[in-house]
Image (cartoon, grey):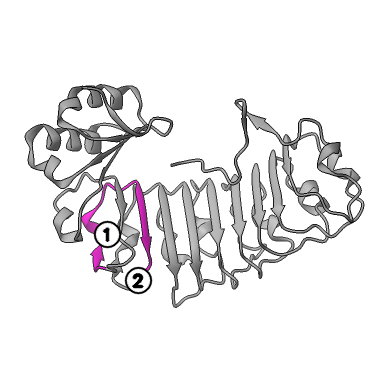
Amino acid sequence: MAIEFISEQHKNITYTEEANSLIKKYVLENPNAIVNFKLNDLKKKNGLELFEFIGNESDARNQISDYETIESILKYKSLKGLFINEHTKPKVDMSNFPNLRLLSCDWNLKILNISTLKKLQQFNLFQYKPKSKNLMELSTLSSLKYLKLGSGNYESLKGLNKLKNLRELRIYSNRSVKTDDTIILESVEALYISSCKSYDHDFYKSFPNLKILHLESSNDLESLKPILDNLINLKEINICGIKVLEEDNTYWKDYKNITTLNFFNRKHQKLKTKDFENYPYKQDGQWKGIPRTIIE
């Protein structure tokens, strides 16, 4: 019996009892694999044993794909990936899931003890509306590497500067968030901003070590020069979704550290995409996707 892939590219597997031994071997050989179980799988000895093995003795991720209530999965303490149904808004005490590596959920006041998730590496958080208007509530997630914030009313990134392992930050659909150059996120290497109209033009000062920057449906920029001058580690920049107002953009070609610059042609600018060698850029023989997700 062959392994049933949801996505072979992303090493995402559906558990089947017939392929149990093959899946275990695959997990050992591919530590970033994802294995999706159903609750009925966990009622059987082989399924439960593999679920626990993945959760406790491997670097792969186990997930339960068909649960209907949080109560039905509370006993599975080795669970690593949890997607909370956005429509149910259940009361969830996150201390029941001490092994989580990935959490995706809409925010509501019934989600308790987020700070206990010391192993959490990826957090997709939507509609976050803290009373404090900042992100201090997330500041204890010491293992967090990837944070995606979709909508919400927070105004400050305060708290994220405490996360020394944070590598990628995505901010979507927040018209209130502003940057503050006293709050420095030194560890962040990839920043994606979309549909955010209030951030300051010198936002880059909060992210001195960026390697990847994507801006979409957000503020116009007077010039790229401050960004290119100050972000000396920058390799990839995508400004397809915003307007850069300067007319003379000939200096864009002077920054040899930039290996990928994606933009739309603008009538008012001197240089067009045709003036850049090998545009649009390729990666591994494929047209480079925008935006790119580091972790799936």
Q: Secondary structure at mark 2?
A: loop
Q: Position of residue 259 (x, y in %)?
A: 72, 34
Give the camera-side residue of 144 and 271: 271
**Left or right position of 160 against 249:** left
Q: Position of residue 201 (x, y in %)?
A: 74, 63
Quickly name the residue at label 2: 108
Q: Is residue 191 above or below residue 37?
A: below
* Between discs 1 and 2, the one toward the N terminus: 1
Q: Is residue 240 above or below residue 253?
A: below
Asked whether disc 1 touches disc 2, contact meaning CB atoms under 8 Å apart, the reply is: no
Residue lying furthest bottom in this view? 131
Quickly name the residue at label 1: 94
| Snapshot quadrant of residue 130 | bottom left
**Left or right position of 120 against 252:** left
Q: Position of residue 204 (x, y in %)?
A: 70, 55
| Residue 210 showing in the rendered view | no
**Residue 263 on the magenta span:** no
Q: Secondary structure at mark 1?
A: helix
Residue type for callout 2 = Asn
Q: Residue at x 92, y 51 (%)?
A: 248
Residue type for callout 1 = Met
Which quadrant is the N terminus positioned in?
top left
Find the distance from the CA under tag 1 to the CA under tag 2: 13 Å
Q: Residue at x 60, y 26 (%)?
A: 284
**Which stretch appears magenta?**
90-108
| Residue 176 showing in the rendered view | yes
Which quadrant is the C terminus positioned in?
top left
